[in-house]
């Protein structure tokens, strides 16, 4: 299979080729490796490939799920595979290997994907941009030197640039959706508890974090949700399911929905006018489809809330860093942690149990305040990010000019102000590449629904994919361009 054909297929089509015997899983892996070799020097999305799953692939080891043979990347922070390197984008953890599989890794392998390597990520996923001192910066496939977003920028950039059709991501403040916005792909965050965090944890990030994938198409997103939304023994609570496979239910037309769209800043950053116009265009499209659309958004001081949330995000980070230091044999300091991360480490050591509990109380209060919106509306439509991608160096952890209290305003507000509320509420949300900016960069549009309403988000996303298709767009930094 040639790179040009491979890089334009979504995962569903590639899996169908394997199932029909038109191409082997090994051939797909070899083509993916060639696509990485072609595109990665400019994008820097992939930090490691596994030769035993490319040239040395034993196809009998692949799972029997719907994505059998599809090349796939694991984020260099989550989705641990036993005895494979997991370095958290950090010099402190360089060379560290995972001690055990996560349930997520087991479910991914059961889906049939062939995990051929790791994608780049910021240090410990603590940034809305993928830039680190260990492996360097990941560019948006649309513009070299501009951020691919974070923290799962490597995965999304690899998908959009045609290296792989699917990549794993984690989302604690928008980390799947922000890269989808700045790189131009599909970034879906499931509801809290939909994807297992076991066996080492009950919930990721004290309920703020969820894992999933980044993709090119809604059909890939829906089918992978069926593969990963599988409760595991010991998971703390079940959440409602639509009763049908997501791969089936997403094809159904959505019922008439009440849609509220908003552009009002939630963390003090005005929305770029072109981004705002794109949101309004999507609102008109939804109205033309028969939905009830009005301008409305939640009441929420996101900047104040984010400052209070810091004691949840960073609680225990000092212990994790010290554990990795012991494992790697390195010393924590400016040679092993980036400037902002080092400040976070020092701050984490000062967080008291009372401070942590107060921060958890603030999250609970914010969740209840934000969720009032869904008492009146079925869908919240907004930008994914207030602005399109910005140059490297704008939000990275290498900056030394931000105090702990300034991190929300200087490093989180632009990428996170519309994404973070869905982590707080535990609601499903997706970023869709529904527009392009005059700068040549993609514009991500976010739609979210009530908890456990993934099927509603997928149905509406599929309708928008048909009405405002993006599959034909090919960025300048793409594997098909020699």
Image: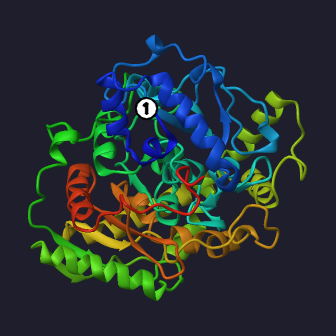
Q: Is residue 223 left or right of residue 183?
A: left
Q: Is residue 377 left or right of residue 401?
A: left
Give the residue displayed 37% in from the left and 41% down from the top: 193
| Residue that carries the numbered disc 1 in the rendered image | 70
Q: Position of residue 315 (x, y in %)?
A: 64, 50
Give the residue displayed 58% in from the left and 30% down from the top: 80
Give the residue displayed 48% in from the left and 30% down from the top: 28
Give the residue displayed 36% in from the left and 30% down from the top: 67
Q: Is residue 73 left or right of residue 192?
A: right
- Coloration mode: rainbow
Q: Is residue 222 above or below residue 289?
A: above
Could you tell me which secondary element the residue under label 1 belongs to?
A: loop
Can residue 78 be seen in the rendering of this structure?
A: no
Q: Position of residue 113 (x, y in %)?
A: 44, 29
Q: Quadrant of residue 318?
A: top right
Q: Is residue 332 left or right of residue 175?
A: right
Q: Is residue 446 above or below residue 271?
A: above
Q: Position of residue 94 (x, y in %)?
A: 79, 36
Q: Quadrant of residue 376?
A: bottom left
């Amino acid at each position: 299979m040639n790179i040009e054909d491979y890089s334009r297929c979504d995962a569903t089509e590639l899996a169908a080729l394997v199932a029909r015997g038109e191409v082997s899983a090994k051939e797909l892996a070899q083509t993916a490796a060639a696509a990485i070799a072609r595109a990665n020097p400019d994008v820097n999305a992939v930090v490691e490939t596994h030769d035993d799953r490319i040239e040395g692939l034993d196809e009998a080891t692949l799972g029997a799920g719907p994505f059998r043979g599809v090349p796939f990347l694991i984020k260099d922070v989550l989705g641990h595979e036993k005895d494979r390197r997991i370095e958290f984008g950090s010099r402190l953890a360089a060379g560290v290997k995972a001690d055990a599989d996560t349930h997520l890794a087991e479910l991914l392998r059961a889906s049939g994907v062939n995990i051929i390597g790791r994608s780049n990520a910021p240090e410990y996923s603590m940034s809305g941009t993928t830039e680190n001192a260990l492996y360097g910066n990941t560019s948006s496939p649309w513009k070299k030197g501009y951020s691919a977003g974070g923290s799962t920028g490597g995965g999304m950039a690899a998908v959009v640039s045609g290296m792989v059709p699917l990549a794993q991501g984690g989302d604690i403040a928008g980390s799947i959706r922000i890269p989808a916005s700045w790189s131009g792909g599909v970034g879906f965050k499931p509801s809290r508890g939909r994807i297992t965090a076991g066996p080492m944890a009950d919930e990721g990030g004290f309920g703020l974090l969820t894992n999933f994938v980044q993709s090119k198409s809604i059909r890939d997103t829906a089918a992978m949700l069926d593969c990963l939304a599988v409760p595991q023994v010991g998971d703390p609570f079940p959440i409602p399911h639509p009763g049908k496979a997501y791969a089936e239910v997403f094809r159904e037309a959505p019922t008439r929905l009440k849609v509220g769209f908003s552009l009002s800043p939630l963390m003090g950053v005005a929305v770029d006018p072109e981004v705002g116009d794109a949101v309004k265009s999507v609102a008109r499209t939804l109205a033309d489809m028969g939905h009830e659309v009005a301008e409305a958004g939640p009441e929420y001081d996101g900047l104040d809330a984010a400052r209070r949330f810091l004691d949840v995000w960073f609680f225990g980070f000092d212990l994790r860093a010290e554990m990795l230091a012991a494992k790697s044999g390195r010393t924590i300091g400016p040679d092993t942690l980036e400037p902002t991360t080092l400040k976070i480490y020092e701050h984490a050591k000062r967080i008291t149990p009372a401070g942590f509990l107060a921060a958890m109380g603030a999250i609970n209060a914010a969740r209840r305040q934000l969720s009032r919106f869904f008492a009146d509306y079925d869908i919240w439509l907004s930008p994914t990010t207030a602005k399109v991608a910005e140059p490297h160096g704008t939000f990275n952890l290498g900056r030394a000019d931000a105090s702990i209290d300034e991190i929300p305003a200087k490093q989180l507000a632009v990428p996170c102000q519309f994404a973070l509320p869905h982590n707080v509420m535990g609601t499903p949300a997706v970023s869709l590449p529904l527009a392009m900016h005059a700068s040549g960069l993609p514009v991500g549009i976010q739609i979210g629904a009530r908890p456990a309403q993934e099927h509603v988000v997928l149905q509406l996303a599929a309708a928008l994919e048909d009405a405002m298709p993006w599959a034909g767009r090919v960025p300048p930094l793409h594997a098909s361009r020699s």
